[in-house]
Image: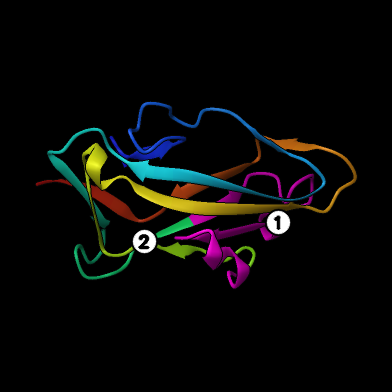
Amino acid sequence: MASFGFYLDSGLTQPITGNVSVSEGSSDFRFYLGSTSSAVKLQDATNPGVDDMYVSIVDSAPGSGPEVTWVKLALTQAGLATAIAGDPLSIGNTLYGGTSFSLPFWVRISNTLSGVASSTELSAKVTNVKEFSV
């Protein structure tokens, strides 16, 4: 995912670089996946253009603090209602670079702890992908 990354805005000017703090209960966020370069596309590394790619939440310290099972992913905010916590999100088989192709997706984090939770151990990843020239 050399030039592709996760952003706070559709124009891909604000990369996600730190923690997301969430209050007790559920909080919804909209993020974007994309590349500012229109000369690239992202596809599955094993079967490019055929197999779907997936956004997954990864926990670098399972069993301590926030867990993957706190997180639901969906392509729309309404889709969060039926999303299954901890499951990856299918994002299709090709994602083109360029800000007009940034992919919005929704994240619902359900904080089961008492009070505000903040963590650097959870992160979003798109695994087994390769960036290709268009």
Badge 2 density bin: few <14, some 14–19, many ≥20, Cα 10 Å: some
Residue located 79% across and 44% down the image: 65
In terms of sequence position, does the residue under pointer 2 or pointer 1 come before the other?
A: 1
Q: Is residue 5 left or right of residue 101?
A: right
Location of residue 64 in the rendering, given as x and y in whole percent from the top left corner: 79, 46
Q: Nearer the viewer, residue 129 or 91?
A: 91
> Which quarter of the picture shows residue 1?
top left
The residue positioned 57% from the left and 52% from the top of the image is 107
User: Is residue 47 highlighted in magenta?
Assistant: no
Name the residue nearer the viewer: 116 or 66: 116
- Magenta stretch: give its range: 56-83
Q: Kindly identify which numbered label has been placed on residue 38.
A: none
The scheme the figure's colours follow is rainbow
Q: Residue furthest bottom?
A: 82
Q: Residue furthest front?
A: 78
Q: How far apart are the alpha carbons under marks 2 and 1?
A: 20 Å
Say which element carries label 2. Answer: loop
Kind of residue at disc 2: Ile
Q: Residue most toward the left? A: 134
* Badge number at residue 91: 2
Q: In terms of secondary structure, where does tag 1 sit?
A: helix
Q: Position of residue 3 (x, y in %)?
A: 28, 35
| Residue type highlighted by circle 1 | Trp
Which residue does the numbered mark 1 point to in the structure image? 70
- Label 1 crowding class (10 Å Cα cut-off): few <14, some 14-19, many 20+? some
Examine the structure image and report whether residue 62 is included in the region drawn in magenta.
yes
Q: Where is residue 68, by image quadrant?
A: bottom right
Measuring 81% from the left and 37% from the top, which residue is drawn there? 116
